[in-house]
Amino acid sequence: MSTQRVVVDPITRIEGHLRVEAILDDSNRIRDAVSSGTMWRGIELILEGRDPRDAWAFCERICGVCTTVHALASVRAVEDAIGTRVPVNADIIRNIMFLTQYVQDHVIHFYHLHALDWVDIVSALKADPRRTSELAQTVSPHWPKSSPGYFQDLLGTLKTFVESGQLGLFDNAYWGHPAYKLPPEANLMAVAHYLEALKWQKEIIKIHTVFGGKNPHPNYLVGGMASAIALESDHAINIERLNMVRTLITDAIQIVEQLYLPDLLAIASFYPEWTQYGGGLGNYLCYGDLPQAGIDDPSKFLFPRGAILDRNLSEVLEVDPRDPEGIREEVAHSWYEYPEGQEALHPWEGTTKPNYTGPKPPYEQLDEQGAYSWLKSPRWKGHAMEVGPLARMLVGYASGREEFREVVGEALGRLKLPATALFSTLGRTAARGLETRLAVHWLLAEYDRLIANLKAGDTATANTERWEPSTWPAECRGFGFTEAPRGALGHWVTIRDGRIAAYQIVVPSTWNASPRDSRGQHGAYEAALLGTPMARPDQPVEILRTIHSFDPCLACASHVIGPDGGTLAEIVIR
Ligand code: NFE
Ligand code: MG
């Protein structure tokens, strides 16, 4: 049997440092895979002994991509521990921050991190601007920038760029690879929209600066939000600011409905074979989010909580993140040490003790029989789970939520695909687009809810009753969560005498990129690669397609930086 190993390290167009090794069979199909997080930072340890009211500011800096989500999970964990609840406006503002993050992050992922796995920039040079214009008007009839002149200009710019020999951020991809299937006109249209989306993404995120003062890393507050609102004032968030937010939301609806979704469906229609690969585990987990009636009632969350095992969409299983037998992290294949005799720990009992036993970098290959990653292996009731957009869309769909059924049904109908097509690389990429569609309309709805509340005279954004540590129990613990763009995110805190005694974070990319567990079960990335045929193993675009479909973030996943490997880009084939 062949033992050819394709090593991709680092995987680019992600956040952080991820290494993937794929072991091929004689026909160049992936028969085994290894996913390794190669960086470590130690945020959980940095938090010990600090004031819990400051934790959000440290946690939030785990990542500048999914900015805000760690702050949200952190303030919720502390509020849960000290027994405080936030005013309605704070929940709504948090929902607005959350949804703004989704819409920006998902559009950036599609165009700037993932599209070039499907779109060949160099092929775009052969496009006829007039035919590109016709195509663009068919695909997105309501998007105004689609004239032949517009595409002619873009083509000129692109030619100058390529002829200069300085492709910059477009350098070093597998242009001309046989796995690229789009005609030149579709490639040119996609390049145009890549640039439009790049300009737009810096606008939408201004919503964070209105409510949170800045971006990345907007401000949060234990007990509410630090957003003073007074409609008629010059010194607070006033009606003028709020009107700007509304304009940004309506512009975002246009980008999602007229660019992102049409482009997603158009590109997907050229790659039907990618509904056959990349499904992976078939187990999905969500904590749910977007409270409509407070944090304690998950049944009223817009994203429902629940789990699906073995692709069984007829049953959504109950998830309790406080259950000591539910979520547990293992370190059998991770560079950590657990207390004597412990194999799996619930996060409230969890520890973070680094123990690097891997080869001295730079190394040729990892040994998957031993420890091989800075990521732990979170498991739910012993099962390896996928988290993220696909999990959310499936749990929403299987929970019978009408909105989910509508957007999923419509997209499958347009592509003429059965529901089983969702269990795939393309399904995961499509799920992200579909949830963005839900998210951008929910964003407007949450905005309207805020305005209605303000007009009714309720301007409270914080509850400071439990601000002073003297009002807290001597010892307490809490769970905080969110559905980060990449999936279920949990923070578990223990507070003793007003200080953080223990803090554990289990992150979406840790679930998805996790190494094998003690029973040898693969993590979601590893499982998703199995069985995928590779056209040219020395140009592993197939690996990128599937791994990028999860939108990896290793800064989040290990939240913990280690020895500098030195080599920055290397593809090794043996
Ligand atoms: Ni840094 Fe993050 C998200 C979190 S990681 S991107 O979304 O939490 O999976
Ligand atoms: Mg952790």
Image: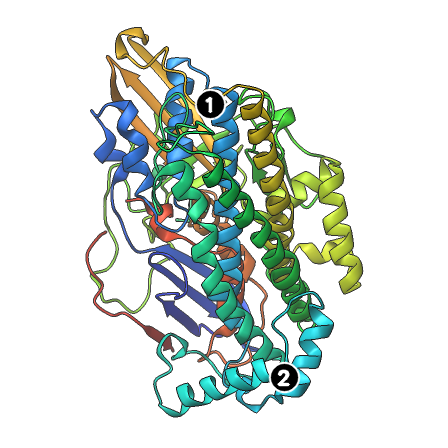
In depth, the one of 455 and 306 nearer the eye is 455
User: Could you tell me which residue is drawn at 48 percent across and 88 percent down?
Assistant: 156
Say whether residue 424 is left or right of residue 239.
right
**SS type, badge 1:** loop
Name the residue type under label 1.
Pro
- The picture places residue 183, in percent across and down from the top left corner, at 64, 83
Q: Is residue 345 shown above or below 112?
A: above
Q: Is residue 234 left or right of residue 49?
A: right
Gap between marks 1 and 2 measured at Cα: 61 Å
**Vertical comparison of 123 with 227: above or below:** below
Viewer-side label of 1, 2? 2
Q: Which residue is mark 1?
A: 324
Indicate how the structure is coloured in the image. rainbow
**Above or below: residue 510 compared with residue 140:** above
Q: Residues within 10 Å of mark 2 (few under 14, many from 20)?
A: some
SS for callout 2: helix
Residue 22 position within the rendered picture, expressed as x and y whole percent measured from the top left: 45, 67
Q: Nearer the N terminus, badge 1 or badge 2?
A: 2
Neighbourhood count class around disc 1 (C-alpha, 10 Å): few under 14, some 14–19, many 20 upward:
some
Image quadrant in which you'd find residue 534: bottom right
Residue linked to disc 2: 148
Q: Is residue 214 visible?
A: yes
Q: Decide if residue 346 is on the left or right side of residue 118.
A: left
Q: Which residue corresponds to the image point at 44% horizontal and 80% vertical from the top-left? A: 538
**What residue is rendered at 31% in x and 72% in y?**
569
Q: Are marks 1 and 2 in contact (CB under 8 Å)?
A: no
Say which residue appears at 40% left-offset and 86% top-offset.
161
Residue 197 pos. (x, y %): 51, 64
